[in-house]
Amino acid sequence: MKSLLYLIAVLVLTTPVFAQEWDPVLTEKWTPVPAIVTPGAGTAAPSDALVLFDGSGLGSWESMKGGDAKWLVSDGVMTVAAGTGDIRTKKLFGDVQLHIEWRTPAKVEGDGQGRGNSGVFFHEVYEVQVLDSYNSVTYSNGQAGSIYKQYIPLVNASKGPGEWQTYDIVFQSPVFAEDGEVVRKAIVTVFHNGVLIQNHVELTGHTPYTGLPKYEPHGKGAIKLQDHGNPMSFRNVWIREL
Ligand code: MG
């Protein structure tokens, strides 16, 4: 009897006649109304973004070694001053959309991981690799756009040495229970020069150089940029909290 009623219901719901009689208003949602955001021109920050670097100074950043960030700023660009250490945002973030532009040295020096290496880290421990991967070989899960030693980029969308490149990254932070258990793993999507290279990948933990990824519970965290000893440059850095 039950299955007969179910069959009748399915027939009624799927008949074209019924579909025609369905009032389209019933499936419209009028609230909430999305906030109005004015898009930036080109890759400029949209109106609701927080600008982390507009070329004028490193006021939003600090050195991981303590004190002010000591990277060089000139012509609207910040460049790693080798040995001054990684820098991180003073403000802490959870889930974000990040736009950052980076440039590897025009003069190629070194190879593999030693050529144009830096990194964009979320919560200081989850790295989206920055590297000169243009006609340069290294392990695939360590090339530009890799989630370091976890996910190989879908394609290599690298531009050549000395050219400006973009990352647009959506980072969803991991969620931890009170006892430290991972309730939701970190999820990352990356566009490199407008090309999708990481599609909603689920991180297995942090991204260490040595050893295996693991999760340590944390709250909000800084965005960190890596001093790997190469004179890497960055510009137009903005972030939207999600
Ligand atoms: Mg790196």
Image: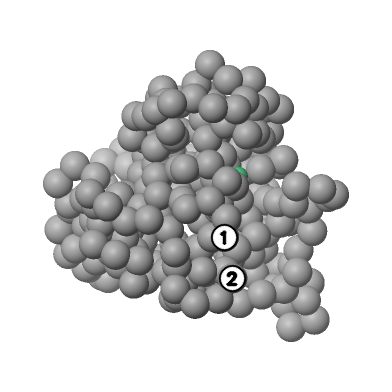
- Name the residue: 39% across, 37% down: 103
Q: Secondary structure at mark 2?
A: loop
CB under 8 Å between callouts 2 and 1? yes
Q: Amino acid at mark 2?
A: Lys
Q: What is the residue that sits farthest to the top in this orientation?
A: 135
- Name the residue: 71% across, 68% down: 183
- The image quadrant where one finds ligand 1 is top right
Q: Report the residue marked by disc 1.
A: 85
- Name the residue: 51% across, 69% down: 63
Q: Amino acid at mark 1?
A: Gly
Nearer-the-camera pick, 132 or 171: 132
Q: Quadrant of residue 121?
A: bottom right
Nearer-the-camera pick, 173 or 118: 118
- Left of 41 or right of it: where is 186? right
Up the image or down, 33 lies above or below 191; here it is below
- Name the residue: 62% across, 43% down: 147
* CB at disc 2 and ligand 1 closer than 8 Å: no
- Left of 89 or right of it: where is 33? left
- Left of 62 or right of it: where is 163? left
Residue 233 place in picture, x, y as percent? 39, 45
Q: Report the residue marked by disc 2.
A: 65
Residue 146 place in picture, x, y as percent? 60, 37
* CB at disc 1 and ligand 1 closer than 8 Å: no
